[in-house]
Amino acid sequence: MKVTISGRHMEMTEALKAYIENGLEKVKTHFDKVIDVDVVLDVEKNRHIAEVNLHANGVRIHSRESSADMYASVDAVLAKLEKQIRKYKGRINRHQPRTEREAQSYGHAIISMPPGNGDSDREVEDGTEEEILHHVVTHEKLPMKPMTVEEAVMQLDLLEDSFLVFSNAETSQVNVLYARDDNKYGLIEPDF
């Protein structure tokens, strides 16, 4: 297990690192293969924030907690992580196993437009059209393990993100699952 512990706006002590690593030892017992754990500690005014990102058995789990004391924040985030893992394991045990398919990957890009009014056929003073260029800010490749919609809902809950792009195991197409404000989910499927 690769553990990365970093701190923002604070000095990391060896005692705090040892405390976190000791708390993460319980996590190893739940998974066959824990790839890595990223722990970020941050201090903002009087708030001590602990954030954990765990990558294990093809699953990403994210937890974040804050309190007035860093050790209390670490305890709270580890307890939340443990609860999320138990919830994940319970759902896995209730699901029927399916055949393993080869992992696919896809490209992900975030595009920003330069400042302006956004019109693509904007004219410059001499009457010629000015071309507006799009700039790729970041490029990311993620493995896309095929999963059912129920598994995607579980993964979205564990990540605490607003959306999840996944390969639907039933249709073999790329789908987007997003969280709605009414504690329900929306699914976007391609229409060919």
Image: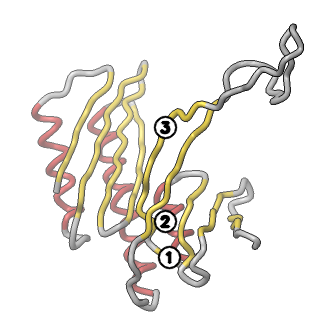
Residue 26 place in picture, x, y as percent: 20, 62
The quadrant of the image that shows the N terminus is bottom left
| Marking on residue 164 | none
Residue found 11% across the figure and 35% down from its top: 15
Badge 1 density bin: few <14, some 14–19, many ≥20, Cα 10 Å: some
CB within 8 Å, label 3 to label 2? no
Kind of residue indicated by mark 3: Thr
Residue 170 place in picture, x, y as percent: 58, 84
Kind of residue indicated by mark 2: Gln
- Asked if 1 appears above or below 66 in the picture, the reply is below
| Marking on residue 138 | 3
Q: Mark 2 or mark 1, which is nearer to you?
A: 1
78 vs 89, nearest the viewer:
89
CB within 8 Å, label 2 to label 1? yes
Q: Mark 3 or mark 2, which is nearer to you?
A: 3
110 vs 128, nearest the viewer:
128
Kind of residue indicated by mark 1: Met
Residue found 54% across the figure and 51% down from its top: 161
- The residue at which mark 2 appears reads as 155
Residue 2 place in picture, x, y as percent: 17, 51
Q: Earlier in the sequence, mark 3 or mark 2?
A: 3
Horizontal placement of 152 versus 179: left or right? left
**Helix, strand or loop at disc 2?**
helix
